[in-house]
């Protein structure tokens, strides 16, 4: 069983700390609702101030210790989490 997803998004982050070496600690969340599913995209990491563009943006590839997590909630996500017994019971008696 394989599960594959591709996500392209722009996420606003905030500087939540400045490290002694001047690097910036970033955190942000974006919530997207699509087809009855709600996706929470959480982003955390560290960047050098010089990596932030003049447009005040940064590519995720320039974020060190990046943690980008996508969590889904909704009927599709719940159906994927059901065990085979529950799926069979739902087909027999919805």
Image (cartoon, rainbow, N blue to C red):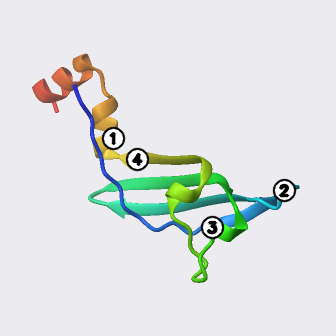
Q: Check disc 1 and report the residue beneath it.
A: 77
Mark 1 neighbour class, 10 Å CA radius: few under 14, some 14 to 19, many 20 or more:
some
Tell me how far mark 1 sits from mark 4, CA to CA: 6 Å
The residue lying toward the viewer, choosing from 67 and 81, is 67
Q: Check disc 4 and report the residue beneath it.
A: 72
Q: Secondary structure at mark 3?
A: helix
Tell me how far mark 4 sits from mark 3, CA to CA: 30 Å
Mark in the foreground, 2 or 1: 2
Which callout, 3 or 1, points at the residue further toward the start of the chain? 3
Q: Check disc 2 and report the residue beneath it.
A: 21
Q: Residue furthest front?
A: 50
Is the C-beta separation of discs 3 and 1 under 8 Å?
no
Tell me how far mark 2 sits from mark 3, CA to CA: 14 Å
Q: Position of residue 43 (x, y in %)?
A: 57, 54
Which callout, 1 or 4, points at the residue further toward the start of the chain? 4
Is the C-beta separation of discs 1 and 4 under 8 Å?
yes
Mark in the foreground, 2 or 4: 2
Which callout, 2 or 1, points at the residue further toward the start of the chain? 2
Q: Secondary structure at mark 4?
A: strand
Q: Check disc 3 and report the residue beneath it.
A: 51
Q: Residue furthest top?
A: 85
Which callout, 4 or 3, points at the residue further toward the start of the chain? 3
- Quadrant the C terminus occupies: top left
């Amino acid at each position: 069983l394989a599960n594959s997803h591709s996500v392209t998004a722009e996420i606003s982050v905030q500087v939540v700390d400045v490290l002694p070496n001047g690097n910036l600690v970033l955190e942000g969340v974006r919530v997207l609702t699509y087809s009855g599913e709600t996706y929470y995209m959480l982003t955390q990491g560290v960047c050098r101030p010089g990596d932030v563009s003049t447009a005040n943006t940064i590519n995720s590839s320039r974020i060190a210790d990046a943690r980008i997590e996508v969590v889904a909630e909704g009927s599709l996500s719940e159906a994927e989490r059901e065990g085979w017994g529950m799926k069979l019971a739902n087909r027999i008696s919805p």
